[in-house]
Every structure is written in structure tokens, then in C-alpha cells.
Image: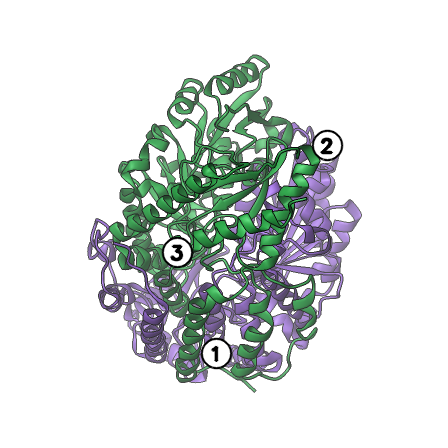
Chain colours: A purple, B green
Amino acid sequence: MIRLVTPEEFRRRGHELVDWIADYRAGLVNRPVMAQTAPGAVRTQLPAQPPVAPESFDAIVRDLDAIVVPGLTHWAHPRFFGYFPSNGDLSSVLGDLTSTGLGVIGLAWQSSPALTEVEEVATDWLRQMLALSDAWSGVIQDTASTSTLTALICARERVTSNSFSRGGLQAEAAPLVVYTSAHAHSSVEKAALLAGFGRENLRLVAVDDRFAIRADALDEAIAADIAAGRVPCAIVATTGTTTTTAIDPIAAIADVAQTHGVWLHVDAAMAGSAMILPECRDLWTGIEAADSIIVSPHKWMGAAFDCAVYFVRHPDQLVRVMSTNPSYLQTEADAVVKNYRDWGLPLGRRFRALKLWFLIRSEGVAGLQARLRRDLENTRWLAGQISAAEHWRILNPVVLQTLCLRHEPPGLAGDALDRHTLGWCDRINRSGVAYLTPAMLDGRWMVRVSIGTIQTERIHVEELWRAITNAVGADRP
Amino acid sequence: MIRLVTPEEFRRRGHELVDWIADYRAGLVNRPVMAQTAPGAVRTQLPAQPPVAPESFDAIVRDLDAIVVPGLTHWAHPRFFGYFPSNGDLSSVLGDLTSTGLGVIGLAWQSSPALTEVEEVATDWLRQMLALSDAWSGVIQDTASTSTLTALICARERVTSNSFSRGGLQAEAAPLVVYTSAHAHSSVEKAALLAGFGRENLRLVAVDDRFAIRADALDEAIAADIAAGRVPCAIVATTGTTTTTAIDPIAAIADVAQTHGVWLHVDAAMAGSAMILPECRDLWTGIEAADSIIVSPHKWMGAAFDCAVYFVRHPDQLVRVMSTNPSYLQTEADAVVKNYRDWGLPLGRRFRALKLWFLIRSEGVAGLQARLRRDLENTRWLAGQISAAEHWRILNPVVLQTLCLRHEPPGLAGDALDRHTLGWCDRINRSGVAYLTPAMLDGRWMVRVSIGTIQTERIHVEELWRAITNAVGADRP
């Protein structure tokens, strides 16, 4: 028997679920941040076989409460300081609900014109907020990973005069080379390998003592490859690296890129949000000379995941590489409209613009700016505490909202120091009081504190600092 | 000033929006199916600049009503017969709302264990529903396009013994070749070009009179490439092509693939949903011999977009190609858990499993089967009407829920027939009564009727048939 959720049932259950989400968000502060669950514990509580008969909505919600939520690490928790802030402001959740509820798909402009045109407007709003010139056009992708892959494929096709239309990359004689730094995000290496360049043709350019690419070293690496008969293809620079928020010098790198005719892609997935603050824009001086940029509003800015905006200066090149035009997608309007299917990898597209549009309208540009400034101020406060504390060290230049910490008590070094570092971080994570991500820097473990969850106020940062000092104290010999 | 939507405001606004969506779905039947909007009309009604100050939620909803909804082509409309059924059953909308409301991200198992484990369970449920053996493992991707790209990259790496770890595809001597048919989805060609194979190394194998790949022609094409020193790499076969729902003979193709050691990827994005019906499973006999399969529950089955499930027999090969392991993503649990970031292109992942899990539980397997059988029955009914009508022709073998029609009045042929076909289709679309997609078949336009929107009952198919006969009548000379 066909069992459909009618609009009337959806109304009732939707209200319940909205309340459930509101309760979840409001009660987050009382939950342990990190999931306190063992591998396999969620899976084994669920039936191994699918239900033949319909189940009640109540049964599903019961399982959410009893099994799913206890198995989550809570990214919206005010004491979540791991990875990066991925917020999902509740205004953006409403925007995404609207998208799912409408259920329209963007295959072509005609397949839902507003899906395309609201995306044109929302990404252009974002462009203005970032103070990018109107030479840039934006398109929403799922993630920075996918966008960087898109950029590297476009770079590959530009330098080979569109080899895709002939024998492909495999028919090219001189190897193409991609340049980035060891501090670039892991997705850059992944994209280079997926695009077919091969690990031997990926150069990790030397960085300075602020973990930023040295433009002179980049220039030398490119010259050496040219001398060896290789073809420099693309540079991926980062505004705000994952580990330390290092800031590659875009202007100097862009000079090198232009000298050698190399594609410059700028990964500002996380720190790009800060460019809505005029006082931060020095961090990417020279950005207008890039070929492509990725900024992910689903990080610090607060859009619900997934919403990464890929900006390009030459959409015609992007469209040439990504275009498909089978008869079943052709419409009369094609000559005068944007068909975003030709701006990225997937054909089908959600109405993702709504979650960005709701966010910007609900918070307002000034509201978004105020929130990011709050987070910067909280970061400075914590940096001050750490700097004043004995045996503590901040290992990165604090330019935005990420701190790299290490507690270095006298006599501890090498592997013993690593054990100490991972030990106190792990104790905090397991305690549920806060969540932090350890990472390697210059061959040793340290602990990242990434501030910027929407609910994170000063008091939560104070609680974090108390938890850290307690955790370290507990480890004293 | 920081302006955040509090949980309490979310509760109030969320209820409003749920009601708004319920009203939208319930009232769809009274709306024109295709957007009656001119290019640029939505965009010009929206402010060119982002708001500095927060706007009220009421203002946003007013714009949804006045600007956005009139600019949509309504995929959930009971008389939507275009492209493919992309449903977003309301149970699945609730699942997706839960995902967005929780706002957790799957970077690693530890970053939200339940996100990974519910995905393991839900994709395994789907595997069982499709009667695939337990040799298959599933992972949720955004779309079939992305999954096919993933498959072709994995095939490329398998045949080159992982060239990514050396000089990449560009260092390979013998060109690698990909095989599919001219009836494969446009995303197959796109994926082959993006993966670096080049158009010259994409073979469009001859099809039979049912538009299905001829296994003998495939074998010959492969033999010719081997003789010429090229390396056969991958075959993409389709269970249910986009234009005609043609069924490539998987068993015979798999024999050819195994003989030559070529990767076989099966695109069952749309028709895969039918494999939950035992009576349909003959359509992909031999499927166990494939290397990868894509089935998109966000099509006919009713999951909210985007939810495409990629099944692989050798997850180790997938993980080898897609794996990244930077220090900031490492956790103690890694050795004993699944890290889905290594199963596809993007690093960050939504909790997509919830929308599939809600759907299967709410409808039950028997409920889903009953709905698909209803659609097959409606298709047979319409096929009967058309077959009995004068001057009408069904151009495809009707195996599932897609009909390819042409009205061929005496004396009309060639371009004049094309004009007639596009004319009546366009009149129906513009009238708003129903939405249909025209497409080319054997060099001439025809009109596809794709049945399977969740709300589509017999009466809507009857109304479509009346609209078609009326539209044709209006064009009589």
C-alpha cells in the first residue's frame, strides 16, 4: 500500500521537528561536545534490514533522540573549537528548508528560473561584500575540494589549449606542473592527483617563518621546471591555511603567475569570510590578479553546509570545459540566460542560493561583520591569556580566529612533548567540555583552537581556557 | 550589531515556513507547471546590493511568494512529466531538515560518528532493496555526474597501477580509452573529458534498434583499440538511458569487460529505483560483475535531492585514489572505522543519510514498491491510449515509466515534422497544464513523457493525454 506523507501530516510533523531542532540548539551547551560513542555503537543499534511496512514518525524521532544525537559531535555547540566553524545559522537552516521543500532542480535556467537568478544575485551580493571587482562571477559549489578540482582542470585545459577536445591530458608531451605549499589544504594535493597531474608534478614550495609561500622560491621552482622542459600550469595559494591560518602573499605570487602565464587559484575557503571586514582585506592584496577564488560561506560566515562560492574572472573558459548540451536539456532561452550546469561538475543542482540569501538578509552585512569582529576579539583575548601564562606558547601569527598552542613545561621535548600535547587535548575532548583539533606543525603536535561558532561568546572561551589549564595540570608529573 | 535567529525565533518562523511549504505542496495542482517568467525577470526584482541592516523574516517570505515561487518550474507538481521524477517526498524533506538543523559535518568518523554509521546502514538497506549481494558497499554522493567521474578516475588509476602516485595520467604512454554509447547520459562524456581521457579516446559504441549497446560492437571496438596499441580502460553501460530508458545488456557487456580486464561502471541513476521491484530485476541481469554502480534515490524513489548512491565492489581501490590523511584529520578511531571522506571528491559531507533513512522508514519498502508499480501501471495506461490513437507513435520500447512520443499526421515529415513536434510540446509547456521535455531521437525531435512524480495519479495522466490531443488539434492545418 502506498504510504505518503501528506501536506497535512507534514505540517504537523514539521512543527514537531522544528521544535525538536530548536530544543537541540538551545540545549547544546549542556551536552558533551564530542560524541561519547564507540566505533560501531550507532550501527549496531539500528536494524540490519530495511522495514517492509511503514514506520511511524514517532519511532524515527525516538531513534534520533536515543541513538543519533548521542552519536554526534556537535558542531554548533558554543564550545566547539575544532576544525573550522561550520555554523548553519538558523536563518540559513530556514533557507535550506525552503529549498528542500520546494524540491526544484536546476538543470537548465528553464527548469526553474528563480533557482538560477537568485543564485546570480546572492553570489553577486557576496562578491560586493568581499570587495571584489565586478570582473568576478560567482557560482555555488558544494565544497572547496570540488572547486579546487574544477580550478585545476580549467587550468589544465587553458595551458593545453583545451586538450579535452582532442587526445586529452594523456596526449600532452611536456608534463604540466602544479605549485602549492605543504601548508595548503589536503584537498589541493587530492585535486591535483584526481586531475591527472601525478604526485611527481606537484611542487610543495618552501614557506617562510610565518608558514606562507615564499614568492622567490616559487619563481625559482617554476624557472627550474621550464628549464627542464616541463610546463608550469597552476599555482594554488591560500588565504588562511588550515593548520595555522597562514597568509600566502597573493600580490607577489600573482606577479610570478603573470610572468609565467600560470593559472592562480586562491583558496580562501575559511578566511575568505573575513574579507567582509575592510580591516582584513590587506590579507589578500593582489586578489584581483587571480584567475579563480573559493570562499565558503558555510564556514565562519554561517551559511548552512554545503555552500562554497567559486569566483572566476573568465566564465567562458569555465563553461567551455564544463559544458554539455544534449537535446533534452536545450531550451529556447539558452542564448540569453545562465545555465549553471556548465559552471561545475554536477548536472543537477539544489536551490542552494536560498540558504545564502536568507543568511545575508537575516543578519545583514553589518550584523555579519559584527559577529566576525566578536570572534576576532575573543581570539585576541585568549591569545593574551596564553601569552601571559607560564610555559605556554602560541606557534602561529594570530591573524584571524585560529590559535596554535603548545604547553611546553620545562624538561619536556620530542616524543614526550608530543605525548603531553596529545594527552591534554584528548582529555579535554573526552571530557565533553570542549572540542579541539590537534595537528602537526614543523614535525611536532600542537593543538588548534578555532573560534567562531555562532553561539560562542566570551564566556565559552573563558571556560575553554579554564578547561585547558585544568587538563594540563592533571598531567603534571 | 549582531543579529542572530534565536532558537525561539527559529521555532516561530520554522512553523510558519513548514506551513508555507505544506500550502505550497497542497496547492501545486492549481499552479502552472512551467515558470511563466522571462529571462532576467526574477533578478531585476531583487536589490542589486546586499542589505546592510537585518531584514525581517516577513520580508523574505513576501519575496518568496511574490518573486521566487512564480519564477519556478514545479518539479513536485502532479502534472510534471519533464526530465525525470525528482521527488523530495515530504518524509525525506523532514530528514533533510533534521540534517541541516543538526549542522554536523562528516570530515572523519569522529567528527560525528552517527553521520557515518547511519549512512552505512541506510546505503546497506538500499543495497538489499536492490537485491545486490553483500559484496557491494555504498556511499552517498551528490549526483550521478560526480559518481561517474569518480568511477572513471578509479578505472584510470586501476589500469595504470595508480599513476597518480607517480607522473600522473600525463606520463602514460598508451592512450587509455573509454567506451559508452551515444545514448549514455551527457555526464559520461563530461566525466571522460574532465578525467583527462580526451574526446578522441571516447568511443560511442553502436546500438541496436532498442537503443541498447551492441556487445559485439563493443568487443570489436575494444579489439581494434588493442590492435592499435591503445589501452581499453572503462565501459559505462546504462540501465535506463535518459532519452528512451534503453537497457544496455549488462551480462553480455560484463563478459566483454572481463575478457579484456576493463572497468565496468553501470549508470542506473534513474532506473535503478525500479530494481526494488523483483519483476524489474531482469533489466540488469549480470550486475554483480560490474565494478561500480550509481543509483540515485533522489530521482524516482523519492529522496530529496541530492542523494545519489555509489556502489563499489572494491572500496580499497576507491579509498586508495581518494584518500587524504593530513594530521588535522587523524583520530585514534581511524583504524577501525569508515572515513567516508575517502570515498568521494569532497572532504566535507552533510548528514545526507537522514533523508534516505526517513524516506525508507516512512514509506516502507512495500510502500515504495507500491508507488513505483502505480507509476508503471499509469505508464502502461497512457501507452495504450497512444497506441490506439490515430497518427501517434511510441518510439521507444516501454520498459519503465518513460514514453517517447511523436504525432505524425499524414504528409508531415522532416523539418516540418520537427516544427510540429516542438510546436505542440511548447504549447503544452506554455499553457502551464503540464511539463514535457522534447529530445532528439535518430535525428528528429520527439517528446518524452516521464511519469513518476509522487503526486501523479491516474487522473493527472488522463489530463495530460487530453492536453496533448488538444495541443495537436490546435496545430492542425
Q: Amino acid at mark 3?
A: Ile
Q: Nearer the viewer, residue B102 or B45?
A: B45
Which mark's residue is nearer the viewer, 3 or 2?
3
Q: Which mark is residue A229?
A: 2
Chain letter of the residue carrying label 2: A
Taking the spot 77% from the left edge, 54% from the top edge, the residue there is A255
Callout 2 secondary element: loop
Three-letter amino acid code of the residue under disc 2: Gly
As measured in the structure, the alpha-carbon distance from the residue carrying label 1 to the one carrying label 3 is: 54 Å
Q: Is the residue marked by circle 1 packed among few (<14), some (14-19), or many (20+) residues within 10 Å?
A: many
Quadrant of the rendering where the N terminus of chain A is positioned: bottom left
Q: Are marks 2 and 1 on the same chain?
A: yes
Question: Is B413 left or right of B407, judged from the image as shown?
Answer: right
Q: Chain of mark 1?
A: A
Q: Tell me how far mark 3 sits from mark 2, CA to CA.
A: 59 Å
Residue underneath mark 3: B454
